[in-house]
Amino acid sequence: MFDPANLVPRLRQFVTSPPERDFVEFEGRWWTAKDVARIGREIGRLLDDVGVPADVAIGVVVRTHVESAAALLGLVAAARPVTMIQPYQASSLVARNVATLNLAVVIAEEEDWTDDLRACLEDGRIGILLPKDMGPPRFSSPPPDTLLEPHRAHRRMVVEVLSSGTTGAPKNIPLEISALVRGVQIITVAGNNVERQVEFLFAPLTSIGGILPLLAYPLVGARFCMFERFKVDTWVDAVKRHRPKSAGATPAIIRSILEAQVPPEALESIKVMYGGAGPLDIDTRKHFAETYDIDLCWGYGATEFAGTLAGWTPQLKAELGGDRPNSVGRALPGIRVRVTDPETGAELPVDMEGRLEATIPGISEDWIKTNDLGKIDADGIIYVFGRLDGAINRGGFKVLPEAIADALRLHPAVRDAGVIGVPDPRLGEVPLAAVELVRGAEPVTGEDLRAFTRQHLPSPSVPVDVRIFEELPRNAMLKINLPALRAMCEVPAAK
């Protein structure tokens, strides 16, 4: 087993002296460790050639592509601070992120070097372009003589991953090496069969679920298959070809497999699936396990915690006689979890619901508050019941209703807006919006407003429908009455 304290040196060794083997399969094509390492080394050379100081944050517009994966590995191996930028949004928002974050260096794939992003370079920024099909990285335009000031910098090496948007738009969460080491350690210890199978990476590389496996796989000699987006047919085809014994999952993946009625024989190689990124009801768990004879082991974690806090394992199920409804297993070794009263902060006894809090080695020895409602039973099993802040869990992406309402209110025809979560058979829950229009405003449709939100929100936050009402229901404080709004939305909205 590798020593996680050597994370950066081991990655540097991988980049400078890559092994002679296939490393990552993407869109049906294998790329070798040498292919990936070459990109990382070349980016490092470009940064060194123009004298970019070691503490300068390197902004990366990260797609879940092999080119972005190679760039991230090279930067971490060089101990360069990394700030991730979400690519799946309007190009004007990408450029705004770069400016707001004071990024002096920007790395992006060829398709993301839009006019909006190129305009950012006029302020003294360095741009590096990643060509398609792993072509040699190059400057997108001649580097400036003087680097942008002030610019984002870090005294210590950090990777700023993106949250899933629990408190609004996705935020950059800085994770120091100690936090990354913890997350990588979990993967390399729990995934003790990682060297004997092709692993599947389907989480966005901007997320904690994407970056941690990417950093772990070179250290344990793993090969992996990377998916830009999860699609049932593509995923099932990869299972048939690579025949993994274990795989990861989200609620949306489990529901999609069941909805597509994938034949059990297609997944016969898989014996256990480890899941997370949101709750999965016990009936769906049982239905999936019975249909495919797969042991479904659910867990619980967050970006701020650098991965998983708790989880079920086959061994724990054997000890306790099976799974338990709404539960996410026990806390991992070294992690303490407790439940507190959301109002007073007092610790609550066994089986009482409240706010989940945790202490995590490598991140904080103090209690970290979550926004999750849960309890812990007498066997130390943790249960998660929902969000205290009302966020919508859309297939693992946390969507804040108020952020959607704020975006809708930017439209000149919208007087006010309310957003609720509605059940979805595949994603678990999706956002539905309702608006009240400004009297006398120009006519607008719900689809017009959906299109408007795409210019202001990441795609998971775009509502599935925007319904227009003459007046939204309100309480005594004139706030939108969400239960009443939900009742209104259960019937067709007025045209």
Image (cartoon, rainbow, N blue to C red):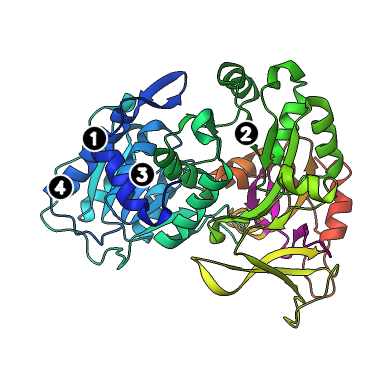
State whether residue 379 is above or below residue 164.
below
Report the disc number at residue 137: 1
Query: Cβ–Cβ below 8 Å for labels 1 and 4?
Result: no
Report the disc number at residue 247: 2
The amino acid beneath tag 3 is Leu
The residue drawn where x is 66% and y is 22% is 269
Q: Which residues are magenta?
A: 377-401
Asked which secondary structure carries label 1, the reply is: loop
Q: Is residue 154 left or right of residue 265?
A: left
Where is residue 72 drawn, in percent x and y?
36, 44
Q: Is residue 268 left or right of residue 81?
A: right
State whether residue 49 is above or below residue 479.
above
Where is residue 59 drawn, in percent x and y?
33, 51
Asked which secondary structure carries label 4, the reply is: loop
Instruction: Identify the residue under disc 3.
Output: 72
Where is residue 369 drawn, in percent x and y?
64, 71
Asked which secondary structure carries label 2, the reply is: strand
Q: CA distance from mark 3 to mark 1?
A: 13 Å
**Mark sitting earlier along the chain (1/2):** 1
The amino acid beneath tag 4 is Pro
Q: Nearer the viewer, mark 3 or mark 4?
A: 3
The amino acid beneath tag 2 is Ala
Asked which secondary structure carries label 3, the reply is: helix
Q: Nearer the viewer, mark 4 or mark 2?
A: 2
Label 3 Cα crowd, 10 Å radius (few <14 / some 14-19 / many 20+): many
Report the disc number at residue 143: 4
Q: CA distance from mark 1 to mark 4?
A: 14 Å
